[in-house]
Every structure is written in structure tokens, then in C-alpha cells.
């Protein structure tokens, strides 16, 4: 039985959430480049030193939400059912995320989520910084796929790396496409059928090219 987090840990979680939510609200209202770290700290009622103890850079105040999902695909591959192909596990996980309207799938029309996505894609500094998170996602997935690669597959390291890059790119593009439609006014429910169909099509394409991970 897991021990519930203590008072100190709960306070850290609350402080982390307060700083992040304060920063995102200010960025959405005024723009990323128009808000200073000092202003965020003041609004969150913490010192700059405390803020940087939780977030090492300004862009981390926003992009940590992506960081929370960095190893998600890798975990799906490692924890898949016995006999289940990695691509099947990832496909099933995505369909579940779409059904739950998980923000990471892009199929979420909560106004705060839509504003968050718009902030990221419309801020050059954030889109550039996002590549770091995507790179770490690729690294984590590559390691998990390397473990799942049949021994007889030639160039196993390169195969796993190329597969991870393609899968991460597909997940990113699908999420972005969902948010493009939702930002244009479509609801998540109205978008759902197309989102699932596009996910199915994308994974069919992946299965056609990534033979080691489809069986």
C-alpha cells in the first residue's frame, strides 16, 4: 500500500501548480514575450528564487506539460500486453486518449486547453523549445523499441531510432491537426470521428513501413 504524500510534498505540488497556472494565464492574456519572470513570481506570491527552484527556464513554465508526457509512448511499449505489437499498443493508447478527450491528443475543446495550444504554436520561442521535449520523447521511445526489436532485424539501433522519430512525429501531427479544427470552431465531439479515422489511417501507414513493430 502506497504511503500518502506528506504535508511538505503536497505543498510543493500546490506551489508548482500555482506558479505554472499563474504564468500561463499571464502569457495567454498578454503574450509570452511581454511577461517577465519577475512579474510571474509576484503574481504567484513567490520569490524569483523559489520560481526557479521549480522551473529552470521561462519556457519550462509552459512546456512542462509536454514534459509530463515525455516517456508516455515508451511506457506504453514497455507495459504492453504479452504478445501485443508495439504499434498496436500505441494505437490503442491513442484511441483511448481521443475517447477521453485527453489534451495531449489535441481532441479537447476546453477553452483553457485551446488557449494553451494557441500560445505554444504562435510563440516562436516556445515552438523552438518544444523540440527539446520531442527529442527526449524520441530518445525514450527509441530505447523502448530497441528492447522490443527482434534480434534478427538488421541495424537494430538505427531501426529503433527511425521508428521512434516517425511515431513521435505522427502523434504530434495528429494532435496539431485536431487543435487546428477545434481552434477554427469545431467541437471535440464533432471532430471525434475524423480524429479517430485519421489516427487509424496514420497507424496503418506506420504498420506498412515499420515491419518489425507490427507483429
Image (cartoon, rainbow, N blue to C red):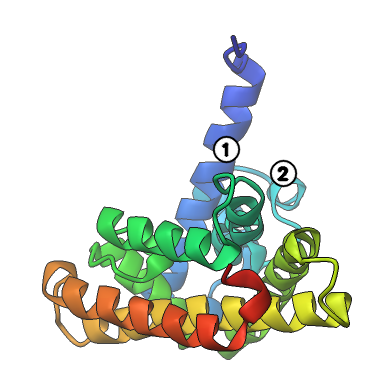
The image shows residue 19 at horizontal and vertical percentages of 55, 49
Quadrant of the snapshot with the C terminus:
bottom right
Nearest to the observer: residue 84 or residue 157: 84
Q: Earlier in the sequence, mark 1 or mark 2?
A: 1
Query: Is any atom of residue 208 visible in this view?
Result: yes
Image position of 125 with respect to 215: above or below: below
Percent of width and height locating residue 142: 76, 69
Is residue 55 placed above or below 2 in the rendered structure? Answer: below
| Label drawn at residue 192 | none
Q: Position of residue 194 (x, y in %)?
A: 21, 81
Quadrant of the rendered structure where residue 84 is? Answer: bottom right
Residue contact at pointers 1 and 2, CB within 8 angstroms? yes
Residue ID at (54%, 72%): 35
Q: Position of residue 72 (x, y in %)?
A: 59, 56
Which residue is found at the position 53% from the left and 83% from the top? 206
Counting labels gives 2
Could you tell whether 104 is left or right of 169 in the image?
Answer: left
Q: Quadrant of the N terminus?
A: top right
Query: Which label was assigned to residue 50?
Result: 2
Considering the numbered disc 2 on the image, is that residue within a helix, a strand or a loop?
Answer: helix
Circle 1 residues within 10 Å: few <14, some 14–19, many ≥20? some
Which quadrant would residue 192 be assigned to in this image?
A: bottom left
Cα gap from disc 1 to disc 2, whole angstroms: 9 Å
Q: Which tag is nearer the camera, tag 1 or tag 2?
A: 1
Look at 24% across and 85% down and name the residue there: 181
Question: Left of 120 or right of it: where is 188?
Answer: left
Choose between 29 and 205: the one closer to the eye. Answer: 205
* Secondary structure under the numbered disc 1 in the rendered image: helix
Residue at 62 percent across and 11 percent down: it is: 3
| Disc marking residue 15 | 1
Amino acid at each position: 500500500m502506497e504511503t500518502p504524500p506528506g504535508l511538505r510534498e503536497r505543498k510543493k505540488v500546490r506551489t508548482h501548480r500555482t506558479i505554472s497556472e499563474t504564468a500561463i494565464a499571464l502569457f495567454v492574456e498578454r503574450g509570452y514575450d511581454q511577461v517577465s519572470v519577475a512579474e510571474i513570481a509576484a503574481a504567484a506570491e513567490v520569490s524569483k528564487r523559489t520560481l526557479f527552484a521549480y522551473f529552470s527556464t521561462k519556457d519550462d513554465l509552459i512546456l512542462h506539460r509536454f514534459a509530463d508526457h515525455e516517456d508516455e509512448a515508451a511506457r506504453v511499449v514497455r507495459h504492453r500486453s504479452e504478445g501485443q505489437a508495439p504499434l498496436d499498443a500505441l494505437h490503442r493508447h491513442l484511441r483511448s486518449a481521443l475517447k477521453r478527450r485527453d489534451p495531449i491528443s489535441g481532441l479537447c475543446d476546453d477553452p483553457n486547453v485551446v488557449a494553451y495550444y494557441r500560445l505554444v504554436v504562435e510563440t516562436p520561442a516556445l515552438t523552438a523549445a518544444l523540440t527539446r521535449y520531442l527529442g527526449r520523447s524520441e530518445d525514450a521511445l527509441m530505447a523502448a523499441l530497441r528492447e522490443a526489436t527482434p534480434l534478427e532485424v538488421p541495424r537494430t539501433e538505427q531501426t529503433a531510432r527511425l521508428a521512434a522519430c516517425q511515431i513521435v512525429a505522427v502523434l504530434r501531427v495528429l494532435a496539431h491537426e485536431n487543435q487546428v479544427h477545434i481552434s477554427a470552431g469545431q467541437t471535440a465531439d464533432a471532430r471525434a470521428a475524423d480524429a479517430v479515422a485519421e489516427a487509424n489511417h496514420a497507424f496503418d501507414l506506420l504498420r506498412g513501413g515499420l515491419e518489425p513493430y507490427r507483429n
